[in-house]
Image: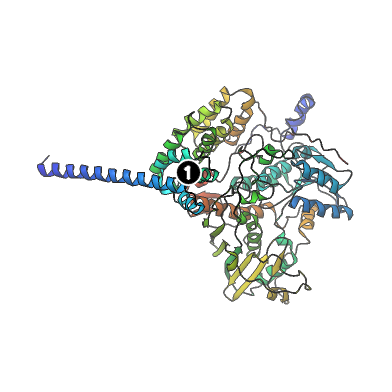
Amino acid sequence: MSTNSLKKVSIAAAAAGVIAQTTDTAQAQGVDELLAGIKSDSAEKRTKRWQSAGEVGAPAVKPLAEVMTDDNLEVARAAKRALWQIVRYTGRPKANKEKRAVEAELVGLLGKDQPVAVRREVLWMLSEIGGRNSIKPIARLIRNEDMREDARMALERIPTKRAVATLKTAFEKAPEDFKPNIAQSLRKRGEQIEGYPCKKLIPTKQTDVKPL
Amino acid sequence: MKKTNQLNRREFLAAAGTAAVSMPYIIPSGVLAAPRRIGANEKITMAHIGVGGMGGYHLNDMIQRRQQGQVNIAAVCDIDKNRLINALKTAGPGVEPYHDYRYILQQKDIDAVVISTPDHWHAVQMVHAAECGKHVYVEKPACCTIEEGKAMVAAAKENNVSVQVGSQGRSQPEAYLAHRYLVNGNIGHISRVDCFHYPSPEDNNPVPDSDPPAELDWDMWLGPLRWRSYNQRYCHGVFRWLLESGGGQIRDRGAHVMSCAMWWMGADGTGPVTVEATGTAPKKGLWDSAVLMDVTYTFKNPDWVLTWRQMPNDQLPKAEERTGNEPGGKISRPGYGAIYRGDKGEFIHWGGDGGTWAEKKARQWELPAGGKDVYKSPGHKEDWFKGIRTGAKTIMNIEAAVGVANLCVLGNLSYVLGRKLEWDQANQTIVGDPQAQRIMGRPQRHPYHL
């Protein structure tokens, strides 16, 4: 490599570093501004901020999840709506890289360290944009009684063969009381299931109101 | 989708010989009952599922028809005990109360059901009723998702039941006059219909989640929706202001005003090629449907544009002044309607539901010799009864109603996604947007599913 070429490479590398640093700084600033707006006492400001959350993207996912359980209901609600805004924005066509980055952050919120309410919400977010990297983490939650129904429905919505295969495995391992639920998802996805007939038309709830 | 785990009638009868007593509840759908076509002089035996709000109206209406000898009322059903008790008192002796609508669907002597539950139940209950051979009157909007709409159309067709959807604007006397006026070219070629409506409300007094009231079965109110804690802002009535369950004004009144537009434009069975929506979100509270909203639907072959606009009250078109003495009376709902824009003039109507008021020029217009007349509904329920008795297509049949509901659903999808959607009417799908395609359907909670 010539000296000129070396110079060009090092200038390019330095420029890339500066751009990355600038981008990181801009993103951090974007997250800070977003969170400040979400936590604002002003309903106007909160609304304006959550509506503009989409472009902030993946770096805002975890910080917003923390605010989703804020004691102030309206602040918590604004954080949830901001997170949904990110999911809807990054789910747009031809934004695969952004979408995968958000997916990765969301998957990170499925762990036991997060409140059930957050994990449930995240399951539904992943049902809209989740791909192969979401499937195993979602499937693990089918073993959790608090979240298994949401996890089943999230997998039902992910339109891949892997999601169906995972539902099949989950069906085999599921306790008897939950097998009909997974059978429902599998039938919805066109699978033939032996046993566990559909219960949708079975009445179960009697009334104690007497006829006149 | 493959149909699985369902027996055909012969298989069921064979199985029933050994298992009917011990396994009465695994009877698959569509096996037990074919719909009954009812003779011209026979009474139709009805059951009412959901008896609050519009359900109360329908029950009272049906009681009058019972007095006229048109129908029997066999059952009322509600998951709110207070509402059920009130309905029972209204309906009188001889009517069975139910909490779970599926008991009603098992009753072979019930010919038809009137479904007036919150929107998120419409598709599930209509499909179940059809599969059990019941004719159905279901409140509007027909469905909350594109996939629900497909299932409703398929269920009505496969089970040969008569379905009327409660967009009763089509059956109003002045809707007939407006329709006739427009199809006879009085405003020329119509290339644009602008629907207007006042805003969806905001909740200025949000409340935290709480325990549900004792009289309400919260699990069954949610039904197919994902589980969440009870909040007073979900029900009753106010479910309309949540995108998931009611969809806001566009799905509530859009299912009326755009129903008139599709009917009068001869556009039933067609759909837009693109849908683009913007809106303003509520600033606080649980409700999340757009307060103000602008939606543009572009149709091709023939080319026309339909818009839905929720606008501030001071921007709404002024309502025509009418005396209370003329048929139809004064315009009591001036806050919604549509303006039809043709190359020779404009026409406006107000309302579009049980109250539909046509502009004076359409009311005064007389059909000339050789002019084109249009179907005049004998009344929305009468039109349904005709469908039940003869198999004739109802004025707001399920295909038409799903077409209108799809407009509402697509408008909301474009709003929440913040982008323009392309719609393939022939294949009933959104094009080129995988996320939007996923949310054309919504997984449903076990066992409250299609």
Dot 1, crowdedness within 10 Å: few (<14), some or many (≥20)? Answer: many
Nearer to me, B75 or A185:
B75
Which residue is labeled 1 in the image? A83
Q: Is residue B19 left or right of residue B334?
A: right
Q: Is residue B412 left or right of residue A48?
A: right
Identified at 85% across, 46% down, the residue is B89
**Taking the image as drawn, is residue B312 in sight?**
yes
The image shows residue B333, relative to residue A1, as above or below, that is below
Identified at 62% across, 26% down, the residue is A179
Q: Tell me residue B162's x, y (percent).
A: 74, 50
| Residue B218 quadrant | top right
Nearer to me, A89 or A64:
A64
**Dot 1 amino acid type:** Leu
Placement of the C terminus of chain B among the 4 image quadrants? top right
- The chain to which mark 1 is attached is A
Q: Tell me residue B326's x, y (percent).
A: 77, 73
The image shows residue B345, relative to residue A90, as above or below, that is below
**Taking the image as drawn, is residue A94 in sight?**
no
Nearer to me, B242 or B134:
B242
Q: Looking at this rendering, what residue extends furthest in the left direction?
A: A3
Label 1, secondary structure: give it: helix
